[in-house]
């Protein structure tokens, strides 16, 4: 995918340039760490010469990540977490109420705020240090390959999400998912369209936008034959209704 050099951030503004830079600075360590970890696991797996056994496990990791992306976005990040008074729930609901609510709903309120676009390296490190040794209990070309695919999928999703908010690429599929995601940020689309990299799981769980909305967004073509840059200003205006 090549960025449109005339409007790589559109509409061009000092604010969005600044916020894109803030978002990228959180992405660089995430990208470096998880890509390096995945590369080491894949290298060790390929050395065993079990490529055709390894490939299905790698593909499984992509499926697992996209499903977890959908489920966490819909049932975790879009849930208002209230603090429970029950002793065994009190600490957990305190953490979710304190950190998850302002993080994701803050992202919806300020969709171009670079501090709310991407996760930080430390956010998922506890999960990483739990899953890595667990995966290594199995042959290196099986579960570790799945874990490597999950990490690479996570890095890809983070960059795609970043790009959906700041860039216009001349790729039809990218423009399709960009419009899809930005409509999710509007007051009309907040309760549907949870997929960030694709609408596959929205189709499976029947949370895709209504047909009339899809036709208005994309037209009647497969990827809507998008040729004009996405109007991001509409997202800014619609997001104000969420405040």
Image: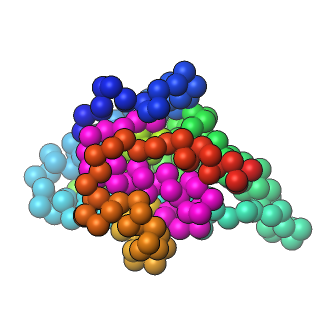
- Left or right of 171 in this view: 201: right
Q: Where is residue 170 in the image (x, y as percent from the top left)?
A: 26, 40
Span shown in magenta: 166-194
Residue 29 versus residue 52 in the image, above or below: above
- Left or right of 109 in this view: 180: left
Residue plotted at (50% across, 63% down): 194
Outermost residue on the right side: it is 85
Q: Which colour scheme is used?
A: rainbow
- Left or right of 132 in this view: 72: right
> Which image quadrant is residue 74 in?
bottom right
> Which image quadrant is residue 187 in?
bottom right
Residue 81 versus residue 179 in the image, above or below: below
Q: Where is residue 4 in the image (x, y as percent from the top left)?
A: 30, 31
Q: Which of 112 and 138 is in front in this view?
A: 112
Q: Which of 139 and 82 is in front in this view?
A: 82
Residue plotted at (37% across, 30% down): 8
Q: Is residue 173 magenta?
A: yes
Residue 231, can we see it? yes
Residue 61, can we see it? no
Residue 105 versus residue 167 in the image, above or below: below
Q: Which of 36 and 191 is in front in this view?
A: 191
Residue 167 versus residue 107 in the image, above or below: above
Residue plotted at (81% across, 68% down): 88
- Left or right of 75 in this view: 146: left
Q: Quadrant of the N terminus?
A: top left
């Amino acid at each position: 995918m090549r960025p449109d050099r005339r409007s790589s951030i559109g509409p061009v503004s000092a604010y969005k340039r600044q916020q894109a830079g803030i978002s990228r600075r959180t992405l660089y360590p995430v990208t470096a760490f998880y890509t390096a970890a995945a590369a080491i696991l894949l290298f060790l797996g390929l050395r065993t010469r079990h490529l055709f056994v390894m490939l299905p496990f790698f593909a499984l990791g992509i499926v697992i990540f996209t499903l977890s992306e959908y489920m966490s976005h819909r049932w975790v990040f879009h849930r208002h977490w209230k603090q429970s008074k029950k002793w065994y729930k009190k600490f957990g609901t305190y953490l979710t109420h304190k950190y998850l609510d302002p993080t994701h709903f803050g992202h919806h309120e300020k969709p171009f705020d670079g501090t709310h676009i991407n996760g930080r390296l430390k956010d998922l490190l506890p999960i990483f240090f739990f899953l890595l040794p667990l995966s290594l209990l199995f042959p290196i070309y099986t579960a570790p390959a799945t874990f490597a695919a999950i990490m690479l999928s996570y890095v890809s999703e983070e960059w795609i999400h970043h790009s959906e908010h700041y860039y216009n690429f001349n790729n039809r599929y990218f423009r399709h998912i960009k419009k899809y995601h930005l409509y999710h940020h509007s007051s009309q689309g907040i309760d549907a369209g949870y997929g960030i990299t694709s609408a596959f799981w929205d189709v499976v769980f029947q949370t895709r936008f209504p047909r009339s909305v899809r036709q208005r967004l994309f037209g009647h073509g497969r990827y809507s034959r998008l040729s004009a840059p996405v109007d991001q200003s509409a997202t800014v205006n619609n997001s104000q209704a969420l405040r």
